[in-house]
């Protein structure tokens, strides 16, 4: 993996539909400038929904790692929004693959520019 990528952190927003859950879309990839916390997580989720005109009642599930800020954010969101399923197990794996894909694309772009 490219060492430059290790110093950056990203918040990836993936989406799928109930009709075709095997197709997953990367709808947003935000480079984090500050440390992530409860407030940042809620804002990033809200911004992604707004950006793609997705209403809160259309959101069924959020997958994340088991970081305490993600768990707190989901509890907070469930108080204000309808009940959202929060799955905590595969998100880290998906993130790792996203980082591998990002590194591959960066390597490819670098080799094309040489």
Image: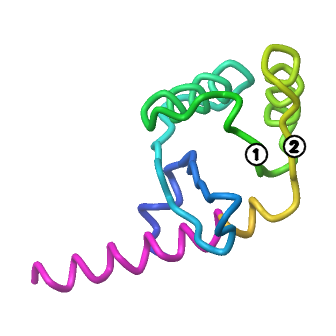
Quarter holding residue 77: top right
* Observer-nearest of 64 and 111: 64
Residue drawn at x 83%, y 25% is 82
From the top left corner, tell me how far across and down residue 35 is, in percent.
62, 31
Answer with mark 2 or mark 1, whichever residue precedes in sequence. Answer: 1
Near-viewer residue (48 or 4): 48
Identify the image's colour scheme: rainbow, by chain, secondary structure or one colour. Answer: rainbow
Mark 2 and mark 1: span between their CA atoms? 6 Å
Percent x, y for residue 103? 43, 74
Residue on which the image places disc 1: 62
Is residue 101 inside the magenta stretch?
A: yes
Q: On the image, numbered disc 2 is attached to which residue?
A: 85
The answer to whether the residues at label 2 and label 1 have Cβ atoms under 8 Å apart is yes
Magenta stretch, main secondary structure, is: helix
As drawn, 14 above or below 105: above
Q: Residues within 10 Å of mark 2 (few under 14, many from 20)?
A: few
Instruction: Name the spot of residue 59 as percent of width and height, x first.
Output: 70, 39
Left or right: where does residue 7 sit relative to residue 35? left
Looking at the rendered structure, the secondary structure element under dot 1 is strand
The image shows residue 102, relative to residue 5, as above or below, that is: below
The answer to whether residue 67 is left or right of residue 49 is right
Does the stretch in magenta take in 45?
no
Magenta stretch? 95-114
Task: Give x and y (percent) for residue 39.
Answer: 68, 18
């Amino acid at each position: 993996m490219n060492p430059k990528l290790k110093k950056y952190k990203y918040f990836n927003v993936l989406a799928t539909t109930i009709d075709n859950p095997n197709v997953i879309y990367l709808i947003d990839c935000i480079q984090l400038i500050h440390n992530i916390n409860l407030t940042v997580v809620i804002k990033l989720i809200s911004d992604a929904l707004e950006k793609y005109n997705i209403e809160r009642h259309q959101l069924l599930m959020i997958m994340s790692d088991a970081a305490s800020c993600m768990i707190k954010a989901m509890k907070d969101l469930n108080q204000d929004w309808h009940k959202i399923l929060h799955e905590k197990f595969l998100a880290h794996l998906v993130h790792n693959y996203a980082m591998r894909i990002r590194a591959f694309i960066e390597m490819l772009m670098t080799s094309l520019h040489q």
